[in-house]
Image (spheres, helix red, strand yellow):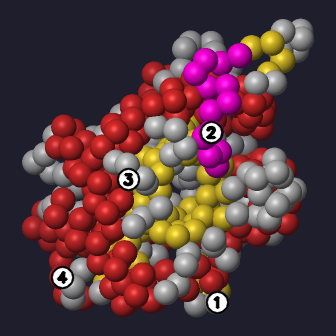
Amino acid sequence: MTRLSVLDLAPISSGATARDALRNTVDLARRAEDAGYHRYWLAEHHLTPGVASSAPAVLIGAVAAATHRIRVGSGAVQLGHQTPLTVVEQFGTLDALHPGRIDLGLGRSGQRARELLATPPEGAAPTPTSPQPTGSAPTPTDPPATETRTVKGLLIPPPFSFASLAKHPLFALAGALLQQPGARTPGFADQVDEIIALLAGRYRSDEGHEAHAQPGEGAAVELWVLGSSGGQSAQVAAERGLPFAANYHVSPATVLEAVESYRDAFKPSRDYPEPHVMVSADVLVAPTEEEARRVGEPYGLWVRSIRSGGGAVRYPSPEEAYAHEWSEEDRALVADRVDTRFAGTPEKVVEGLRVLKEATGADELLVTTITHDHADRVRSQDLLAEAWSDAGF
């Protein structure tokens, strides 16, 4: 069977606190383990009112301590804000405490965020990319499609441009607060190579000096690269023979480009003689279509808050969402994310994930679910696990 895993942002609901969100995350992870999910990954977000996963390494430790078998990891560490040594020491510590269960997912969105802050040349077309924790810059290939299309049954919307979002003051403030003044972040490929070298115990500086991370050296962490397009992240993963996690949930327009680019450039490694792909998806499962629509109503409003530049708001209740008056501009702002969410009965969602798996050739699927009430998220996770198992995919 194709493995199912969970990506969690530790969402904060309206009327709740970060403490509530973190408590819910630990509970959801326990239940995910009981339901048979393979991994439980925590995202990294900063200065976001409605998301509590700002320190994934800390939260991974709490989740791993509360569970027994499920793999726990990052989806993803933002390398634009940390040094390779810091990352290796953090995850080496986690591996020492929970041996054989820790995944280290790496993303370059911190770097990409600073690139987006630079003003493009006058008249230049904005680059379709994502500044979220799993973002990756695309390579300049053919012009992006401007119409929604279907590929092997999978909905592929036009790319969304984050150019205007990158100019929001909060975007620049986050970058400034997450890095020391005057600090320079090396290239993503160089950082990944340093992490690999530190984990393997073969790091050498340009001057020939050795460095040995303790904890960290020899840690049995599973290394992943996450990305949203066929750009640098996909290339770095492929050239080093690492597994690659592609985002359908953040950037559905470029998921096929991402997995194709990764597979085309893949070089076999000791651990991965063949390419290995995991694809993410937004999911909401309920007993009936009507209930799925009601519970899922706040999703568009929540995406709107992200796309407007102020960061994800506390996740609204269905009643709060129904009270919102939508403009055509607002609907266009969120259409790609709303249209590509798999929501409905267990049978409907399982069929949608089957299509996603076959269209992308995914070896694993990573699902993320956000609801206002924690019980609805638990129910969605349980219903999906049961239906997926029954379907035998």
Determine whether 369 is above or below 86 in the image. Answer: below
Name which residue lies at 25% across and 65% down.
377
- Amino acid residing under circle 3: Asp
Instruction: Name the residue: 51% across, 30% down.
Output: 96
Residue kind at label 4, given as amino acid type: Glu
**Whole-Å distance between the Cαs marked 4 and 2?**
43 Å
Identify the secondary structure beneath mark 1. loop
Measure how far apart labels 4 and 1 are at the Cα level. 28 Å
The stretch in magenta equals 212-224
Q: Is residue 308 visible?
A: no
Give the mark nearest the N terminus, 1 or 3.
3
Mark 2 highlights which residue? Answer: 220
Q: Which residue is mark 4?
A: 291
Horizontal relation, residue 349 to residue 129: left or right: left
Give the numbered dot on residue 8.
3
In the image, 378 versus 330, the foreground residue is 378
Q: Residue at x 18, y 77 (%)?
A: 294
- Residue placed most toward the observer, 225 or 218: 218
Which is more foreground, mark 4 or mark 2?
Answer: 2
Question: How many angstroms separate mark 4 from mark 3 (CA)?
Answer: 22 Å
Q: Which residue lies under the disc numbered 1?
A: 152
For the residues labelled 4 and 2, say whether their Cβ atoms are less than 8 Å apart: no
